[in-house]
Amino acid sequence: MTKPSRRKHYSNVLATCVLAAGLVSCAPVIHNHGYVFDEIDLSVLKTGQTTADAVKSMLGTPTTTSVIDGQAFFYIYSHYQTQSYKAPQEMDRIVLAIYFDEQNKVKSYKQYGLDDGKVVAFVDRTTETTGKELTVIEQLLGNLGRVGSGDSGTPGAGR
Protein backbone atom coordinates (compact mmCIF):
# COMPACT_ATOMS: atom_id res chain seq x y z
CA MET A 1 0.00 0.00 0.00
CA THR A 2 1.15 3.44 -0.77
CA LYS A 3 0.75 6.38 1.54
CA PRO A 4 -2.21 8.02 -0.29
CA SER A 5 -4.27 4.81 -0.22
CA ARG A 6 -3.51 4.22 3.47
CA ARG A 7 -4.58 7.78 4.27
CA LYS A 8 -7.77 7.27 2.24
CA HIS A 9 -8.46 4.02 4.11
CA TYR A 10 -8.11 5.75 7.51
CA SER A 11 -10.32 8.63 6.42
CA ASN A 12 -12.99 6.13 5.27
CA VAL A 13 -12.82 4.32 8.63
CA LEU A 14 -13.07 7.64 10.48
CA ALA A 15 -16.04 8.76 8.37
CA THR A 16 -17.78 5.42 9.01
CA CYS A 17 -17.21 5.73 12.78
CA VAL A 18 -18.56 9.30 12.83
CA LEU A 19 -21.63 8.25 10.82
CA ALA A 20 -22.24 5.25 13.11
CA ALA A 21 -21.91 7.44 16.22
CA GLY A 22 -24.38 9.92 14.75
CA LEU A 23 -26.93 7.18 14.04
CA VAL A 24 -26.56 5.63 17.50
CA SER A 25 -27.06 9.00 19.19
CA CYS A 26 -30.48 9.28 17.53
CA ALA A 27 -31.75 6.02 19.05
CA PRO A 28 -34.39 6.60 21.73
CA VAL A 29 -33.65 5.80 25.38
CA ILE A 30 -36.45 3.91 27.15
CA HIS A 31 -37.22 4.44 30.86
CA ASN A 32 -39.71 2.33 32.82
CA HIS A 33 -40.83 3.62 36.23
CA GLY A 34 -43.07 2.15 38.89
CA TYR A 35 -44.91 -1.11 39.33
CA VAL A 36 -44.52 -3.72 36.57
CA PHE A 37 -47.94 -5.24 35.89
CA ASP A 38 -48.65 -8.90 35.37
CA GLU A 39 -52.12 -10.04 34.30
CA ILE A 40 -51.87 -12.96 36.75
CA ASP A 41 -51.72 -10.41 39.59
CA LEU A 42 -55.25 -9.20 38.84
CA SER A 43 -56.69 -12.72 38.83
CA VAL A 44 -55.91 -13.09 42.56
CA LEU A 45 -58.04 -10.06 43.51
CA LYS A 46 -61.42 -11.32 44.70
CA THR A 47 -64.07 -8.66 45.34
CA GLY A 48 -65.40 -8.88 48.89
CA GLN A 49 -62.81 -11.49 49.92
CA THR A 50 -59.24 -10.20 49.48
CA THR A 51 -58.07 -7.99 52.35
CA ALA A 52 -55.78 -4.96 52.10
CA ASP A 53 -52.98 -6.87 53.85
CA ALA A 54 -53.35 -9.74 51.35
CA VAL A 55 -53.15 -7.25 48.47
CA LYS A 56 -49.92 -5.83 49.91
CA SER A 57 -48.42 -9.30 50.32
CA MET A 58 -49.37 -10.30 46.74
CA LEU A 59 -48.67 -7.06 44.86
CA GLY A 60 -46.25 -5.33 47.19
CA THR A 61 -46.41 -1.87 48.70
CA PRO A 62 -48.60 0.46 46.61
CA THR A 63 -47.10 3.47 44.87
CA THR A 64 -49.51 5.70 46.78
CA THR A 65 -52.64 5.39 48.93
CA SER A 66 -55.78 7.38 49.61
CA VAL A 67 -58.04 7.51 52.64
CA ILE A 68 -60.77 9.73 51.20
CA ASP A 69 -64.16 7.92 51.09
CA GLY A 70 -62.68 4.67 52.31
CA GLN A 71 -59.24 3.40 51.50
CA ALA A 72 -57.61 2.89 48.11
CA PHE A 73 -54.27 1.61 46.86
CA PHE A 74 -52.75 2.89 43.63
CA TYR A 75 -50.08 0.99 41.68
CA ILE A 76 -48.60 3.20 38.95
CA TYR A 77 -46.43 2.31 35.94
CA SER A 78 -45.03 4.81 33.42
CA HIS A 79 -43.11 4.22 30.19
CA TYR A 80 -40.95 7.16 29.01
CA GLN A 81 -38.95 7.66 25.84
CA THR A 82 -36.13 10.18 25.43
CA GLN A 83 -34.69 11.11 22.04
CA SER A 84 -31.36 12.94 21.89
CA TYR A 85 -31.68 16.39 23.45
CA LYS A 86 -35.48 16.42 23.82
CA ALA A 87 -37.29 16.19 27.15
CA PRO A 88 -38.59 12.72 28.12
CA GLN A 89 -42.03 11.97 26.72
CA GLU A 90 -44.46 9.67 28.53
CA MET A 91 -45.54 7.02 26.03
CA ASP A 92 -47.71 4.83 28.28
CA ARG A 93 -49.14 4.85 31.81
CA ILE A 94 -51.11 2.26 33.73
CA VAL A 95 -52.71 3.01 37.08
CA LEU A 96 -54.31 0.15 39.00
CA ALA A 97 -56.72 1.55 41.59
CA ILE A 98 -57.93 -0.90 44.24
CA TYR A 99 -60.77 0.36 46.44
CA PHE A 100 -61.59 -1.15 49.86
CA ASP A 101 -64.81 -1.24 51.90
CA GLU A 102 -65.26 -0.61 55.65
CA GLN A 103 -64.08 -4.17 56.46
CA ASN A 104 -60.83 -3.51 54.57
CA LYS A 105 -61.75 -5.95 51.79
CA VAL A 106 -61.55 -5.27 48.05
CA LYS A 107 -64.70 -3.40 47.01
CA SER A 108 -63.61 -2.87 43.38
CA TYR A 109 -60.59 -2.28 41.20
CA LYS A 110 -60.02 -0.57 37.90
CA GLN A 111 -57.17 0.12 35.50
CA TYR A 112 -56.65 3.56 34.03
CA GLY A 113 -54.46 4.46 31.08
CA LEU A 114 -52.71 7.53 29.77
CA ASP A 115 -55.87 8.65 27.96
CA ASP A 116 -57.85 8.62 31.21
CA GLY A 117 -55.61 11.20 32.91
CA LYS A 118 -55.86 14.95 32.86
CA VAL A 119 -52.88 17.27 32.77
CA VAL A 120 -52.82 19.66 35.72
CA ALA A 121 -50.80 22.84 35.36
CA PHE A 122 -49.14 23.74 38.64
CA VAL A 123 -48.74 27.43 39.37
CA ASP A 124 -45.74 28.50 41.41
CA ARG A 125 -46.63 31.76 43.10
CA THR A 126 -44.91 33.64 45.88
CA THR A 127 -46.28 36.27 48.19
CA GLU A 128 -44.28 39.46 48.54
CA THR A 129 -43.61 40.54 52.11
CA THR A 130 -43.27 44.08 53.31
CA GLY A 131 -40.14 45.27 54.97
CA LYS A 132 -36.49 44.87 54.27
CA GLU A 133 -34.66 41.61 53.90
CA LEU A 134 -31.50 41.63 55.95
CA THR A 135 -28.29 40.01 54.88
CA VAL A 136 -26.43 37.67 57.23
CA ILE A 137 -23.92 40.43 58.06
CA GLU A 138 -26.72 42.93 58.85
CA GLN A 139 -28.40 40.37 61.12
CA LEU A 140 -25.15 39.68 62.99
CA LEU A 141 -24.32 43.37 63.40
CA GLY A 142 -27.88 44.14 64.48
CA ASN A 143 -27.65 41.55 67.26
CA LEU A 144 -24.30 42.82 68.62
CA GLY A 145 -25.92 45.52 70.76
CA ARG A 146 -28.30 43.04 72.36
CA VAL A 147 -25.68 40.56 73.55
CA GLY A 148 -25.42 40.65 77.36
CA SER A 149 -27.89 43.53 77.73
CA GLY A 150 -30.62 41.29 79.13
CA ASP A 151 -32.94 42.54 76.42
CA SER A 152 -34.38 39.60 74.50
CA GLY A 153 -35.86 41.93 71.93
CA THR A 154 -39.43 41.45 73.10
CA PRO A 155 -41.43 44.34 74.55
CA GLY A 156 -41.60 44.25 78.32
CA ALA A 157 -38.68 41.86 78.68
CA GLY A 158 -36.06 43.00 81.15
CA ARG A 159 -38.50 45.17 83.19
Image (spheres, rainbow, N blue to C red):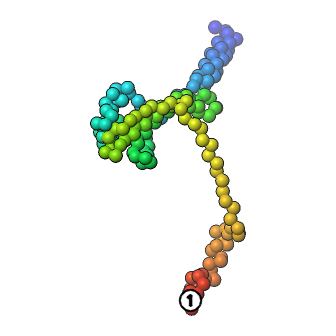
Query: What's the residue at 63%, 22% (across, down)?
Result: 22
Residue 62 visible in the current orientation: no
134 relative to 27 in the view: left or right: right
- Which residue is more in the foreground, 15 or 55? 55
Q: Nearer the viewer, residue 81 or 139?
A: 81
Q: Residues within 10 Å of mark 1 (few under 14, many from 20)?
A: few
Determine whether the residue tagged by mark 1 lies in a helix, strand or loop: loop
Q: Is residue 145 above or below residue 57?
A: below
Residue 68 drawn at (x, y percent): 44, 48
Residue at 62%, 46% (x, y): give it.
Answer: 122
Q: Which residue is mark 1?
A: 158
Judge from the rendering whether residue 107 lies leftward or rightward of residue 148; answer left or right. Answer: left
Rendered residue at 43%/37% (across/down): 97
The spot of residue 120 in percent (x, y) is: 60, 41
Q: How many marks?
A: 1
81 above or below 8? below
Taking depth in this image into account, of 15 and 90 the one nearest to the observer is 90
Location of residue 154 (image quadrant): bottom right
Report the quarter where the C terminus lies.
Answer: bottom right
Which residue lies at the image location 39% right of the left edge and 40% below the top edge? 99
* Image quadrant occupied by the N terminus: top right
Say which amino acid is labelled 1.
Gly
Residue 158 seen in the current view: yes
Residue reaching furthest bottom?
A: 159
Q: Position of residue 7 (x, y in %)?
A: 67, 14
Q: Is residue 21 left or right of residue 128?
A: left
Q: Residue furthest top?
A: 1
Residue 94 x/y as whole percent: 47, 31
Asked whether 29 or 43 is in front, the reply is: 43
83 in relation to 70, above or below: above
